[in-house]
Image (cartoon, grey):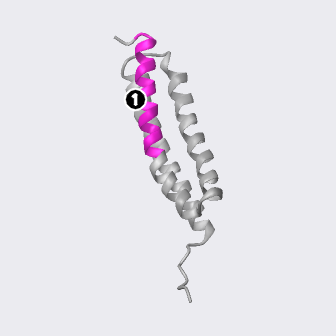
Amino acid sequence: MEPTRYRPPTWATVLSIALIVGLIAPVMYLVTTFLFHFSGGQYRMGPVVDYGGLAVIASTLLLTPIVWKVRSPAAALKCAAIAAPVAWVVAILVEWGFSFALGAG
């Protein structure tokens, strides 16, 4: 007979994913806003920062249900914990590239 594993309730997993994305997103949005929109005086970077933040949040929230369905709730939680910071690093690199394309010196 196989031992039963403890599985956290579904609501706890969903809440954990929401907290991961919900706590990282505002902090990193403020960081990218400061780095690329205000500190360089580049008014043209506003939409790039806004759309970059929305893309990161949407991609993380789109990826986790797919992983949940294909693998498991625990894998979706791990995916959110890994994908959110990685996506923000990618967003920072992309926004940095756009800041030079839009005229940073």
Determine whether 41 is above or below 81 in the image.
above
- Report if residue 60 lies within the magenta region: no
* Amino acid marked by disc 1: Phe
What secondary structure prevails in the magenta region? helix
What residue is shown at x 53% (from left), y 30% (from top)? 52
Determine whether 57 is above or below 77 in the image.
above
Residue indicated by mark 1: 34
What residue is shown at x 45% (from left), y 25% (from top)? 95
Q: Quadrant of residue 32?
A: top left
Q: Residues within 10 Å of mark 1 (few under 14, many from 20)?
A: some
Quarter placement of the N terminus: bottom right
What residue is shown at x 43% (from left), y 16% (from top)? 42
Q: Quadrant of residue 73?
A: bottom right
Q: Which residues are magenta?
A: 84-103
> For the residue labelled by badge 1, is the local secondary structure a helix, a strand or a loop?
helix
Residue 10 at x, y = what percent?
62, 68
Determine whether 35 is above or below 71 in the image.
above
Q: Residue furthest right?
A: 69
Residue 49 at x, y = what percent?
50, 27
